Image (cartoon, rainbow, N blue to C red):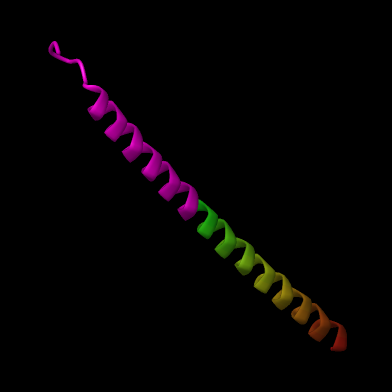
């Protein structure tokens, strides 16, 4: 192979590494999204609770 040309094995390995990293990022973002949704649900419940307390005053 000439200078600057990658072998098929190198290209496949790089593609595999990229795919693993993409999967890692996807899973990390899904976990982050789930955590944000959970936090939003808790906040919504707390706001509802506060509204009920204010109505009782």
| Relative depth, front residue between 47 and 39 | 39
User: Image quarter for residue 6?
Assistant: top left
Give the residue at x 72% y 70%.
44
Give the residue at x 17% y 15%.
4
User: Is 23 one of the magenta-colored residues?
Assistant: yes
Residue 2 horizontal/vertical position (percent): 13, 10
User: Image quarter for residue 47?
Assistant: bottom right
| Relative depth, front residue between 22 and 32 | 22
Residue 16 horizontal/vertical position (percent): 34, 37
Residue 28 horizontal/vertical position (percent): 46, 54
In the rendered image of this protein, does residue 17 appear above or below residue 9? Answer: below
Quadrant, the N terminus: top left
User: Is 2 one of the magenta-colored residues?
Assistant: yes
> Does residue 56 appear to the left or right of 25 in the view shown?
right
User: Image quarter for residue 43?
Assistant: bottom right
> Does residue 31 appear to the left or right of 17 in the view shown?
right
In the rendered image of this protein, does residue 5 appear above or below residue 14? Answer: above
> Does residue 26 appear to the left or right of 3 in the view shown?
right
What range of the chain is rendered magenta? 1-28
Looking at the image, which residue sits at the far bottom?
57
Quadrant, the C terminus: bottom right
Residue 56 horizontal/vertical position (percent): 86, 88
Q: Main secondary structure of the magenta part?
A: helix
> Does residue 33 appear to the left or right of 4 in the view shown?
right
In the rendered image of this protein, does residue 54 appear above or below residue 10? Answer: below
């Amino acid at each position: 192979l000439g200078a600057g040309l990658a072998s098929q094995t190198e290209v496949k390995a790089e593609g595999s590494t990229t795919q693993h990293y993409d999967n890692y990022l996807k899973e990390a973002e899904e976990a982050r999204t789930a955590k944000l949704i959970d936090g939003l649900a808790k906040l919504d419940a707390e706001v509802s609770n506060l509204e009920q307390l204010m109505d009782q005053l």
